[in-house]
Image: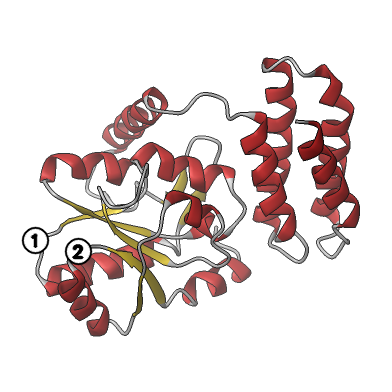
Amino acid sequence: MVSRRRAAQTAMIRTALVHTKSRESVLAAARKIGLECRFHPYSASHLERLKQPALLIFDTDAVEHLTPALLQALRRDHVTGVRHSPALALCRTRSEAGAWRDAGAVAALRSSTAETLARAMREALAGADDWVTSKAYVGPSRRKRAPILKLRTRRAGDYAAKARAGAGAAPTASLGVIARRLHLGAALLSGSSLENRQAFLALAQELARAIVLQHRPDLAMLARAIQDQAQLFLKDEQRSTAILDALVAELAQKL
């Protein structure tokens, strides 16, 4: 179920970050539903640092390195605004739409009319009210978007989507990447939602696994201390991040 705090957060998404060549049709569609558009040529690294959730609208070949798998990785691995940002992927052809839908984005053709794009924007915003967060998938509920399917068919579809996502998933992140994510997450941790604090703990646990896989036993005690701080934040979201910031800074220095 969506918490009251989460429902209030998604209800406030009235801004779209737009990176597309179809500027006029997107702007006309946004006006139909009272959505504010900010046109900016953002990159995947910009999305990592997004402070508040927003509707992401982009041409599928416009955002550098952004693929369906990376969209899922950004949502799973970050406690920044991208984790709860709905997405509208503007595709060149119908054949690429399926992969984006599997990744939790609403897909539409770039040649769509303003009316069609407005419907797609409404669907993306509505999906934010039924958000799923798990180790395998973060995004709007895909089952709710296909209610006429039988249960067995839905489960088979979910399994196939998970298999496709797993096939294209990136290998374990480098310690440097995880350290950067911890730094970004720690900056937004104090006063954040329980879900965000749980996501930060999951990231701290990923650090411990990466230390083993990447043969850095010298960092084990530091990783344990970061996990302990993350656990404390689960109990008290108003804690100071001073100790955690110092631990993350020490981690960055040792890499």
Spatial distance from mark 2 to mark 1, Cα to Cα? 11 Å
- Tag nearer the camera, 2 or 1: 2
Q: Is residue 142 above or below residue 54?
A: above
Tell me if I can see residue 133 in this picture. no
**What kind of element bears circle 2?**
loop
Q: Determine the image quadrant of residue 212.
A: top right
The residue positioned 74% from the left and 54% from the top of the image is 186
x%, y% of residue 198? 70, 48
Inspect the image, locate mark 2, and give the three-letter code of the amino acid beneath it. Answer: Lys
x%, y% of residue 5? 62, 70
- If you read the primary sequence from the N terminus, does the residue marked by circle 2 or circle 1 appear first? 2
The residue positioned 87% from the left and 33% from the top of the image is 222
Q: Is residue 1 above or below residue 164?
A: below
Please name whichever residue, 154 or 42, is drawn nearer the observer in this view of the structure.
42
Total numbered labels placed on residues in the image? 2
x%, y% of residue 118? 21, 73
x%, y% of residue 49? 56, 57
Badge 1: few (under 14), some or many (20 or more) residues near its Cα, within 10 Å?
some
Inspect the image, locate mark 1, and give the three-letter code of the amino acid beneath it. Answer: Ser
Q: Quadrant of the C terminus?
A: top right
Circle 1 residue? 111
Circle 2 residue? 21
